[in-house]
Image: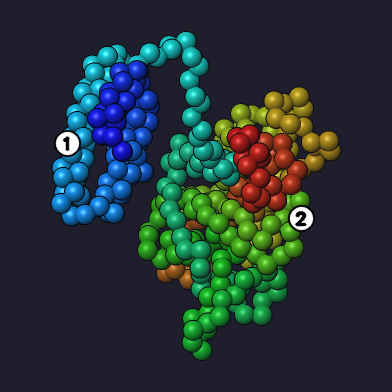
Amino acid sequence: MNLERLNTQAQQEISNVKSFQDLENWRVKYLGRKGELSLFFDSLKSLSFPLRKKQGQKGNQTRQFLLSLYQQKREDLEKNQPDFEFFDLTRPGEKIKKGYLHPLTLILREIVHSFEKIGFEVVEGPEIETEYYDFDALRMPENHPARDMWDTFWIKPKGKSRASKLLLRTQTSPMQIRYMEKHQPPFRIIVPGKCFRFEATDAQHEFQFHQVEGLMVAENISLANFKFIIREVIEDIFKHQVELRFRPSYFPFVTPGLEVDIRQKQDTRYKKQDTNEWLEIMGAGMVHPQLFKNVGYEANRWQGFAFGLGVERIAMIKYGLDDIRLFFGSDARFLEQF
């Protein structure tokens, strides 16, 4: 291989280089591992040592020459580069994809805020409960028929003691006992949280659901206080677009007990159900005196009301949904609507 001719050819070609990509192609052709100069050094293996040494020195001189050509051209290209890249200000920006809060999160926050505005404190409780707090302390001892109202997910006990029996809480009502054990009246609290019941799912029932437990205890509390507070909260959430109905019911830990139903008023901004039927949203009542006794309160001094508000039921009415199972699906198209 004639090195002088290689130098001349390389010098002619680099003079025509106009971009960094062209320069890189030139470097690969002459200085790359499989380039012209590498082929020259490979050919020296068959020569005698004196001749190989002489030709190797010439090859190194050629390498230095080619490297100088490359470096000079690179500097020239960098000097000719503009100081800034053109940016089209009229080009539409790229929309940043963002996440969405779950509809249950949205409605739960709204419910909590409505109660906070009228002085209720927010507390939390455990999702894994003991049999005592979930049933016994709420006037539902073992074999009590009222337990059939709460289909239960039991957790295998670690010991033989009844106190060690654990379960996934069937309601948020155990926090009534837990809170009263550590606090003296007067107080007003709500307890938002998830509950679990071992039952078949359908359009209006799920084995997991959310409740907002409420408890207010003082010396002169009546059902009139309860009705006023619940009406204020529901009307605040629905902007006076629903009707309320109170009707008698039974729960072991309240007396008297009642349930609260709501339905949409006619011609509202919310989606109207075809039948416009009443939908139960909570069970409630005056706290049974036995619960006060269980926590050591002074007899015949305190009165209070308690309620368990169904979050999914509120969301179904507000968002015009007819299937509770949508809340626990994984369809992003449903979640993105909120």
Percent across and percent down for residue 34 are 36, 43
- Name the residue at 41% across, 52% down: 186
Q: What residue is shown with label 1?
A: 61
The residue most toward the top is 90
Q: In front of the other: label 1 or label 2?
A: 1
Q: Earlier in the sequence, mark 1 or mark 2?
A: 1
Please state, as top left, top right, bottom left or bottom right, where the C terminus lies in the image: top right
Residue 317: image tag: none
Res 289 visible? no
On screen, residue 7 versus residue 333, left or right, reads left
The residue most toward the right is 275
Residue 162 to residue 277: above or below? below
**Category of crowding for the residue at label 1, using alpha-carbon neighbours closer than 10 angstroms: few (below 14), some (14–19), many (at least 20):** few
Res 94 visible? yes
Percent across and percent down for residue 177 are 48, 65
**Category of crowding for the residue at label 2, using alpha-carbon neighbours closer than 10 angstroms: few (below 14), some (14–19), many (at least 20):** few
Percent across and percent down for residue 128 are 51, 68
Pick the front one: 211 or 56: 56
- Name the residue at 45% across, 36% down: 117
Whether tag 1 and tag 2 are in contact, CB under 8 A, the answer is: no
Q: Quadrant of residue 320?
A: top right
- Name the residue at 69% across, 39% down: 317
Please state, as top left, top right, bottom left or bottom right, where the N terminus lies in the image: top left
Residue 136 to residue 54: above or below? below
As shown in the figure, which amino acid type bears the numbered disc 1? Gln
On screen, residue 272 versus residue 336, left or right, reads right
Percent across and percent down for residue 73 are 25, 22
Residue 202: image tag: 2
Give SS at disc 1: helix
As shown in the figure, which amino acid type bears the numbered disc 2? Asp
Give SS at disc 2: loop
Pick the front one: 18 or 255: 18
